[in-house]
Image (tube, rainbow, N blue to C red):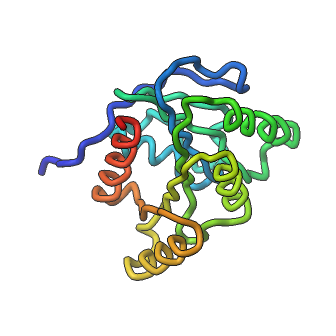
Amino acid sequence: MKSNIKHLDMTFVESAAEYSQCLVHNEPEIAFVGASNAGKSSAINAISNQKKLAKTSKTPGKTKLFNFFKLSHGYIVDFPGYGYSKVSKKQKKEWSKELPKYFDHRKNLIASILFTDIRNPMREMDLSMLNFAYSKGVPTLLVLTKSDKVSTTEAEAISDHIQKNYGENLIFSIQEKASIQKLSSFINELLSS
């Protein structure tokens, strides 16, 4: 059976360790942010229908750079995951300087998508990231990942709670075609407008 999902045509362009090394261009960008184990890389692979576009691992914290992915109308920038304890203190300190620079100075940043595990959503670091994005005037969609790990009823209850307390959200699983399509459509519309 053929899939009706319209995946996003995405290509990896480059990585940058520091804000000063980030790709210079004039197209709109969406920042992908979230904890190290929230599933950002898996989501990139699902919405692009490419199993190895973004590196994934059983060990959280694989993304250690700003990774730029080109789409037809702009870019997705996959940020390093936060909260992973095995990352060195030096690396954490570096990220705590580089990430704010991005939000402060990136003129073409139009939105962020914050990925959070539906089984334990909106942890302290997620709340800090959300508040930070809002303080910089960056609209943020919350994506509740790994929804296949909970019942539909539980997922909807969590989504309702998140909606009331934190804002717009999307229930998402790389196992569910409908949620892949919703996230793909959201990104495409945002970059096209």
Q: Residue at x 53, y 77 (%)?
A: 161
Residue that appears at 46% across and 80% down: 157
Residue 125 locus on image (x, y percent): 72, 58
Left or right relative to 13: residue 89: right
Residue 111 on image: x %, y %: 53, 43
Quadrant for the C terminus, please. top left
- Numbered marks: total: 0
- Depth order, front residue of 111/5: 111
Left or right: residue 10 compared with residue 38: left
Tell me which residue sits at (69%, 62%) in the image: 127
Q: Is residue 59 above or below residue 116?
A: above
149 to 68, vertically: above or below: below
Give residue 87's position: percent from left, percent from top.
78, 44
In the shown orientation, is residue 81 left or right of residue 148? right
Which residue sits at x=23%, y=47%? 5
The residue nearer to you, when weighing 84 against 74, is 74
In this view, the residue in front, 135 or 80, is 135
Name the residue at the left extreme. 1
- Percent coordinates x, y for residue 54 in the rendering: 49, 36
In the rendered view, tell whether residue 123 sits above or below residue 115: below
Dividing the picture into quarters, in which one does residue 191 lie?
top left
Where 166 falls versus 57 (above or below)?
A: below
